[in-house]
């Protein structure tokens, strides 16, 4: 059996079989009217009245391509139950209609395998769009949750190159086909978007969390971002300090979690402040990349940063030290750095002054015009390692023949 949410498959020539679960006749009618039922070769509809307790039996007895649940599911406990039922039925695509959509509910809903949550009162267009999205995605592959990565980038000291590396790593990941976004969490001095795009952003992190998050869902978040590639987008930091100051840690948490539902890689440009907000972000990160350089002032600050993060309870396994603008045979060796900082060096990236400056000054990803540049190559390798697609590493039949044992 397929894992939940991994693959949903339907023969395109068959009508889409839709089930509606609701408790009131009026609710069923509401959904029925929205769906185009004029052509039974395109779509058929079955109505069921009842709660979740009825659902398991219904799905056991019938085959459906889509399930629409009107109201019924309200609480986290309902979602847990729904998750179990959907898991039993090969991740049947499900749309929830609910009057009480909080960001937390949305996150739990998506966690439990629900495809879409639409707010009531029902907007007919939104339901039609959601149904068609599911209908046309004959084969729909969602990355299993475990593979998603949240990577935080932090400069040990100003000018380490953390924003440059994070934004350009995002580009490399996107180029290699991984759906990636970067959230600029450097709230006071954020400039990440400018590193990779000359587009004028239409909204920022402040807009996403405004109105008490009433509009926030994964789709709204995605549409608020500035697109660099179809597979790579950046959410800029707020423009003014006043709006930046109003952002709360719990809001950051929700934004990161929503992003993690939609993107394979979520990169966080952290800035250097260690406060409630950045700690919330670091908590959610799988790894924290600490960017430094090969001179004494950077080493001192790297040591302080590592100590501070350890004091906050982050394990050394979570920290990845990156030495940027590294020169082999320089005065200070990598071993010296490791010894002084008290952490292993995870990776080095070379110095490439002219090309990197040109990229930064033009607001273009380095690899978009200098893909042979050693820094671009380093980031490309870093992205490939992060993506770690098993099929890329598996030896083919030919090499199996050669290395027979
Ligand atoms: N590998 C490199 N080779 C040459 N120049 C580099 C390299 N990496 C970064 N730079 C240069 O360093 C400058 C500072 O980088 P960046 O703004 O990314 O630093 P930061 O760590 O984010 O600093 P801040 O703390 O101010 O946010 C960049 O404008 C870029 O020109
Ligand atoms: Mg920066």
Image (tube, grey):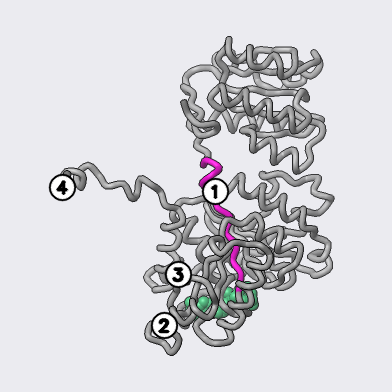
Q: Which residue is mark 2?
A: 327
Residue 19 placed where, x, y %? 64, 17
Looking at mark 3, is its residue's CB closer than 8 Å to ligand 1?
A: no
Q: Earlier in the sequence, mark 2 or mark 3?
A: 2
**Residue visible at 18% across and 48% down?**
403
- 373 w.r.t. 143: above or below: below
**Horizontal and vertical percent position of residue 253:** 71, 53
Residue plotted at (22% across, 42% down): 397
Position of 13 compared to 28: left or right? left
User: Which disc, if any, is residue 402?
Assistant: 4
Q: Please tell me whether mark 1 sits on a helix, a strand or a loop.
A: loop
Local packing at callout 2 (Cα closer than 10 Å; few below 14, some 14-19, many 20+) is: some
The answer to whether the residue labelled 1 contacts the one labelled 4, judged by CB atoms less than 8 Å apart, is: no
Residue interval drawn in magenta: 143-155
Name the secondary structure under disc 2. Answer: loop
Q: Which mark is residue 148?
A: 1
Q: Distance from label 1 to label 4 (Cα)? A: 35 Å
Q: Is residue 188 left or right of residue 297?
A: right
Which of the numbered marks, if any, corresponds to residue 347? 3
């Amino acid at each position: 059996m397929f894992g939940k949410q991994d693959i949903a498959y339907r023969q395109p020539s068959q009508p889409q079989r839709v089930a509606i679960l609701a408790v009131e006749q009026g609710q069923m009618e509401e959904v029925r009217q929205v769906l185009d039922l004029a052509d039974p070769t395109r779509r058929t509809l079955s109505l069921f009245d009842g709660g979740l307790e009825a659902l398991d039996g219904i799905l056991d007895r019938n085959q459906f391509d889509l399930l629409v649940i009107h109201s019924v599911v309200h609480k986290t406990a309902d979602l847990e139950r729904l998750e179990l039922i959907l898991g039993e039925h090969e991740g049947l695509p499900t749309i929830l209609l609910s009057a009480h959509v909080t960001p937390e509910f949305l996150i739990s809903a998506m966690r439990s395998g629900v495809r879409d949550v639409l707010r009531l009162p029902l907007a007919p267009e939104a339901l039609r769009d959601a149904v068609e999205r599911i209908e046309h995605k004959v084969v729909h592959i969602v990355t299993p949750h475990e593979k998603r990565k949240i990577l935080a980038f932090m400069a040990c000291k100003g000018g380490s190159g953390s924003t440059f590396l994070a934004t350009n790593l995002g580009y490399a990941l996107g180029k290699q086909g991984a759906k990636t976004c970067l959230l600029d969490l450097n709230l006071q001095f954020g400039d990440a978007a400018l590193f990779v795009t000359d587009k004028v952003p239409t909204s920022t992190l402040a807009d996403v969390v405004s109105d008490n998050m009433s509009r926030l869902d994964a789709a709204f978040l995605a549409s608020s971002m500035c697109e660099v590639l179809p597979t790579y987008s950046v959410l800029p930091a707020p423009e003014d300090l006043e709006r930046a100051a109003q952002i709360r840690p719990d809001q950051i948490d929700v934004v990161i979690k929503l992003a993690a539902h939609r993107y394979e890689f979520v990169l966080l440009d952290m800035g250097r402040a260690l406060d409630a907000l950045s700690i919330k972000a670091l908590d959610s990160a799988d790894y924290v990349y600490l960017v430094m350089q090969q001179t004494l002032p950077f080493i001192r600050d790297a040591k302080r940063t590592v100590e501070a993060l350890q004091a906050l309870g982050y394990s050394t396994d979570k920290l990845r030290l990156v030495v940027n603008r590294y020169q082999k045979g320089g005065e200070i060796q990598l071993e010296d750095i490791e010894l002084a900082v008290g952490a292993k060096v995870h990776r080095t990236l070379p110095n490439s002054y002219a090309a990197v400056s040109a990229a930064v000054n033009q607001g273009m990803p380095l690899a978009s015009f200098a893909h042979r540049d050693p820094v671009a190559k380093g980031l490309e390798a870093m992205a490939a390692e992060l993506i770690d697609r098993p099929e890329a590493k598996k030896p083919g039949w030919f090499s199996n023949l050669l290395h027979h044992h």
